[in-house]
Image (cartoon, grey):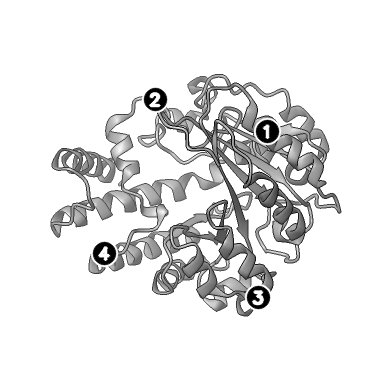
Amino acid sequence: MSTCTGEIKSKNITLVLTHQCNLNCTYCYEHHKNGATMPFALARDIIEDELTRDDGTTLVEFDLFGGEPLLEFETVKAIVDYFKVREYDKDYIFFITTNGVLLNEERKAWLRKNTEHLQMGLSLDGTKAMHDRNRSDSFDDIDLAFFRDTYPLESVKMTISRETLPDLAEGVIFCHEQGFEVSCNLAYGIDWDNEENQRIFERELALLVDYYIAHPAVKPAAILDINRIKSLAEEHETVRYCGAGHAMRAYDCDGTFYPCQFFLPICVGEEAAKRALTLDFSAGRIKESQLDEACKTCFIRNVCPTCYGNNYATTGDIDRRDMRLCNLNKIQFKAIAYFAAKRFEHGQDGGFSKADMAAILKAALALMGALQ
């Protein structure tokens, strides 16, 4: 790995090592799985090309993806062992998100020796009952302590399904109590649009706010990230949440690259994936002209979470949001605003400067008023 200095300009490169998975998660968006795998030689050539490409980037994160990438553990080892002894002008790191059930002691020993080159994040959907409900009764096959102790800077990835939504707060708190930071989100590609889901989501976020106010040393889950309120106070254009089609590309098992993994044939099917190769991401942000009429007048339109891949999969257009998430997004931002106000009330600055806290509080009060 190199030690380049200066301005960091990064890109994210996904390599799909396999379409196969050993679990059958209830919310999986990869509906077109097959037996394809990526040969080591192809993976090596792609990585070499990205590391030597004259594109102005100085840092590359290579996400080794699936399916379940650890089904191709020997390929993972070959990639890391090949590149860790070579030097490039760009800094780079390999990263895997895994379901965690395929690790024996030999594999764990190798992974511990290679943390400088390969980091791993665990998909953990909350308590045992929640996780088993979503992820094929796999909780007892995961060595939580291994992930906590080997990758202490990595948060667990917690996906909320309709079935586990009523336990969202309990699940996040459980993960914290196991020693993890938490990145959680609502599952993509399913229909959330009913009043009962909205009522439950509002209740669960309120419970989480109460927990964080009572435990100010715990880093809040990303779903309550107050920085999003700060962005609302500062930004006038639509916030771009990812680098799809810009600082991101995903290579399928055959070497074809797409804007991100959500546009792969395994996710959207062959025909839609072919169309994705012609999409124009040059605007850099969602085009205002393409927004749904309800979005154009929405108070949070500039910071509303958006996934270009989910937009494409559900609406056929990267610039048109999945409106089934609309009311839940508003509830989420209202909860963030409430959290910011409660922190201010309890004298908890969350590490923000006084000027930032003033801007955040102003935005929070405006949000709570607009989203009544």
Cα separation, mark 3 vs mark 4, equals 33 Å
Q: Determine contact: label 2, label 4, CB under 8 Å.
A: no
Label 2 secondary element? loop
Give residue 237's mark: 2
Closer mark to the observer between disc 2 and disc 3: 3
Dot 3 corresponds to which residue? 105
Q: Distance between the residues labelled 2 and 4?
A: 33 Å
Residue that mark 1 sits on: 316
Q: Residue furthest right?
A: 35
Residue type at mark 3 is Glu
Quadrant where the image shows the N terminus: top right
* Mark 2 → mark 3, Cα distance in angstroms: 49 Å
Judge the density around disc 3: few (<14), some (14-19), many (≥20) Cα neighbours within 10 Å. Answer: few
Residue pointed to by mark 4:
217
Give how far across and how far down residue 292 sits, in percent: 52, 30
Q: In this view, does 297 lie above or below 157?
A: above
Element under label 3? helix
Mark 1 residue type: Gly
Whether residue 312 can be seen here: yes
Mark 2 packing: few (<14 Cα in 10 Å), some, or many (20+)? some
Q: How far apart are marks 3 and 1 (CA)?
A: 45 Å
> Under tag 4, what secondary structure?
loop
Query: Upstream in the sequence, badge 3 or badge 1?
Result: 3
Q: Name the kind of residue labelled 4 in the image.
A: Ala
Against 113, residue 354 (above or below) is above
Dot 1 lies on which element? loop
